[in-house]
Image (tube, rainbow, N blue to C red):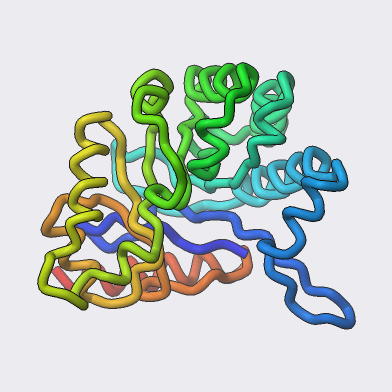
Amino acid sequence: MFQPIVDLRTRRAVGAEALLRWAHPTRGAISPVEFIPLCEASGAMPRLGDWIVQTAVSIASSWNMPVDPGSPPFYVSVNASGIELGDPHHADRVLALCERASLPAGALKIELTESDYVVEYGAVHANMAQLQTSGIPIMIDDFGTGSSNLERLSEVRANVLKIDRRFISAIGCAADDAPLVQSILGLARGLASSVIAEGVETDVQADWLEEHECRFAQGCLFSRPVVSADLAAVCAGLSSRSRLRL
């Protein structure tokens, strides 16, 4: 499944996050929250992670999404765990998969959770640096919910901070004008990082974020996760809506 990420200035899709779903034959839909920890505990996570990247890169290489002249390519973002990034050869495999699929630089972004970002693994930071140097940006997912070491954030700077949905849900619901979101936006500006707001569900939230210079967002206001075959139509629909908005 893929969920579009939009530019709040134009409300057009600029990329999509790859979301893993397990449709069990007897138990139905099983959340990654349930099966990912089991994969990590059993040692299956590196193999599953490689399959996810390979599948996402292969699918993304077949997309033909229109972008504005001079804009970066439409991208797919893929989640990676600290266990995967702790493998010294992880970046080499990711880069080899991109080369094999002829996926251009910038058309893949890697997401990792805030807790994994600060793991004391030299290989994690080495992999991150190698990917960034090769043109693959690093995103910090669910930012604000973990235990970030600010010194480490400044040493190995993430290209993108994704604000967790629980902070976005507070926008428009209280009189305090979402101070935590404003703080994260200020931190991101200081680190020269972009920001994506997760879980945007209302126009009030989207307008507030745009007004406070949050550039990108994803959430059900724009689209629920869809299969790859439907993604082009969803993105085209967002473009049509953006023209009407103008």
Count of number-bearing discs = 0
Q: Residue visible at 45% across and 61% down?
A: 4
Q: Does residue 66 sit above or below 165 in this rendering?
A: above
Q: Is residue 108 visible?
A: no
Q: Could you tell whether 80 is left or right of 155 in the image?
A: right
Percent position of residue 7, x then y: 29, 55
- x and y, in percent, of residue 91 in the image: 65, 24
Q: Quadrant of residue 156?
A: top left
Q: Nearer the viewer, residue 109 or 79?
A: 79
| Residue 67 shown left or right of residue 19 in the figure | left
Q: Quadrant of the N terminus?
A: bottom right
Viewer-side residue, 245 vs 131: 131
- x then y, percent, for residue 62: 62, 50
Q: Nearer the viewer, residue 94 or 38?
A: 38
Instruction: Please tell me whether residue 122 is drawn above or below residue 90 in the rendered image.
Output: above
The foreground one among 131 and 198 is 198
- Please state if 243 lies on the left or on the right of 225 as rendered: left
Residue visible at 45% across and 52% down?
142
